[in-house]
Amino acid sequence: MATLSTLEPQVAARIEEDAANPVFWSKEFELYSALQEAQCDLLLLVGRPDLTVSVPFDIVPNTWLQAVPAGIFALTNVQGPATEVWKIRLQDMDYGLVSGPDWEQDIGDTIQKWWPLGFGKFGVWPSVAQPQTVLLTGIASPITGLWPYDGTESVVFHGEDFDALEKYAASYCRLKESGQESEEGYKLYQEYLQRAARITQLEDRRDPFLFSGSIGASITANPTKMR
């Protein structure tokens, strides 16, 4: 599997930096960080790879606000002790008036609803008086290490997508400059967005096909609409 150090020389070449001994941009603090941000952004735009991860999580008692654990990029499901917890929006709690305007103070035996709050937090209702273990399921984070990165972090995308990651990272780095260099960065970012749109189209055309590990044949789940 490719790592950040695999893509870094190509990013350095795009911004006319010495890959072996960078001078203007820091390999550790800027180039690797740009590539990690590129992975997160491309994952949001394309929605793939949709590698899921499930981890047990102890609901913090006496508060509705909870922190998404490390390793989960986007939380998608919460499984309670007996059944799946109903996913809603924070707006639903305010408009639905489940228990009045002070629902933040509600305490119960088990949580019944949950809602996402950005990527790092989520809310639950009602709060619990004692710690309660649930199973959180979500999209696995492309970033597994701590900042600053050393280049050994994995690249979760296919090789044909590396060009998009490199363009985003080069655009990210060019923001450090101004004038014509910054304008060139905007052009690279537009090329990156076009590439992301194309990747989405290709992945959408692959989705209707399910592959059986036992016989290696493809089964059409939905008809292909475009050729």
Image: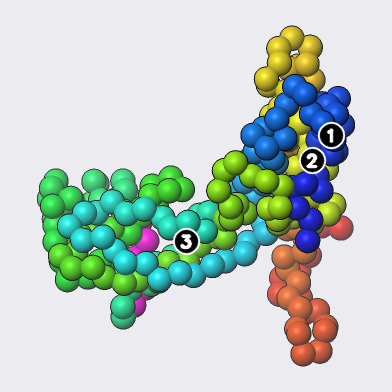
Tell which circle, 2 or 1, labels the residue nearer the N-terminal end: 2
Q: Position of residue 218 (x, y in %)?
A: 80, 79
Give the residue at mark 1.
19
Would you say the residues marked 2 and 1 are in contact, meaning their CB atoms lie under 8 Å apart? yes
Is residue 177 depicted above or below 171 in this figure?
above
State the scheme by which the image is colored: rainbow
- Distance CA(mark 3)–CA(mark 2): 32 Å
Q: Position of residue 53 (x, y in %)?
A: 54, 67
Residue occupying the point 17% across, 57% down: 62
Q: Is residue 167 left or right of residue 94?
A: right
Residue 80 is tagged as none
Q: Main secondary structure of the magenta part?
A: loop
Q: Is residue 86 left or right of residue 128?
A: right
Disc 3 residue type? Thr
Quadrant of the frame with the N terminus: bottom right
Tell which circle, 1 or 3, labels the residue nearer the N-terminal end: 1
Residue occupying the point 79% across, 56% down: 2
Q: Position of residue 14 (x, y in %)?
A: 85, 30
Crowding around mark 2 (Cα neighbors within 10 Å: few <14, some 14 to 19, many 20+) is many
The number of numbered badges drawn on the structure is: 3
- Distance CA(mark 1)–CA(mark 3): 39 Å
Give the residue at mark 3.
76
Q: Under tag 2, what secondary structure?
A: helix
Disc 2 residue type? Glu
In which quarter of the view is residue 183 placed? top right
Q: Under tag 3, what secondary structure?
A: strand
Disc 1 residue type? Ala
